[in-house]
Amino acid sequence: MKDRALGLIELTSIAGGFLVADTMLKASNVKLLLSRSICSGKYMVLIGGDVAAVGAAIHAGCTAAKGCLIDQFVIPSVHPDVFAALARSRPVEPTGALGILESFNVANLIEAADTAVKAANVTLLEIRLAMALGGKAFATFTGDVSSVQAAVDAGRAVIAGAGLLVNAVVIPRPHPEAWREVV
């Protein structure tokens, strides 16, 4: 899956979001993964495809966004767990440690989650994006304590580097009832 890329544009305008989504889809052969309004009156457009197509679509979308652009990214060779976590298709295994990354920004959190899962032998459980979260986003990971710590540290560096870190924690042995709240 090395040529598989993920791209996202986050905007301050809902109307602008519809325009940007349409522009991106017309500009390149990409798959629309998510296009919706999110908390705090923002809008996000998430696409997937090969690296060149995603890059072209993101470029076209950023141009169409005019003054509404909050953030954008293209992640080439995105880790397969990122797609699964966005779809919430991975069952929770109540073993090992639990790591949580939390960001004020959707785009930044996805980049941090991809970095984290590539940095250590962890399972990315879920990426939750800005719905009923006041515009924030978070990701959860599981694995052995040292691996989860390494993943959270790598993701924290990405989020903190952008000045968007809300919190990052590692829980070594979550209580079984706490695991039920993870997804």
Image (cartoon, grey):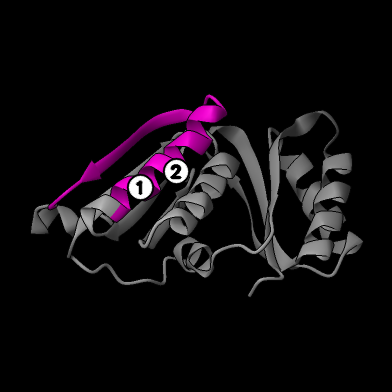
Q: Is residue 43 left or right of residue 181?
A: right
Q: Position of residue 71 (x, y in %)?
A: 68, 37
Type of amino acid under label 2: Ala
The answer to which of 127 and 52 lies nearer the viewer is 52
Is 41 on the left or on the right of 167, as rendered?
Answer: right
Q: Quadrant of residue 170?
A: top left
53, 41: nearer the viewer: 53
Task: Estimate the x, y position of residue 38 in percent, counting from the top left.
Answer: 56, 43
Residue at mark 2: 154
> Within the magenta stretch, is there residue 41?
no
Tell whether position 149 is magenta: yes
At x 35% / y 52%, what residue is drawn? 140
- Residue at image position (52%, 54%) is 114
* Element type at mark 1: helix
Q: Nearer the viewer, residue 170 or 92?
A: 170
Residue ID at (31%, 55%):
147
Horizontal side of 121 relative to 36 (left or right) equals: left
Name the secondary structure under disc 2: helix
Q: Residues within 10 Å of mark 2 (few under 14, many from 20)?
A: many
Do callouts 2 and 1 mark residues in contact (Cβ within 8 Å)?
yes
Q: Is residue 63 above or below residue 5?
A: above
Tell how many labels. 2
- The percent position of residue 102, horizontal first and vertical second, equals 40, 38
Q: Which residue is found at the position 77% from the left and 63% from the top?
A: 51
Decide if residue 132 is in sight here. no
What span is colored magenta in the figure? 147-173
Q: Which residue is mark 1?
A: 150
Residue 99 visible within the image: yes
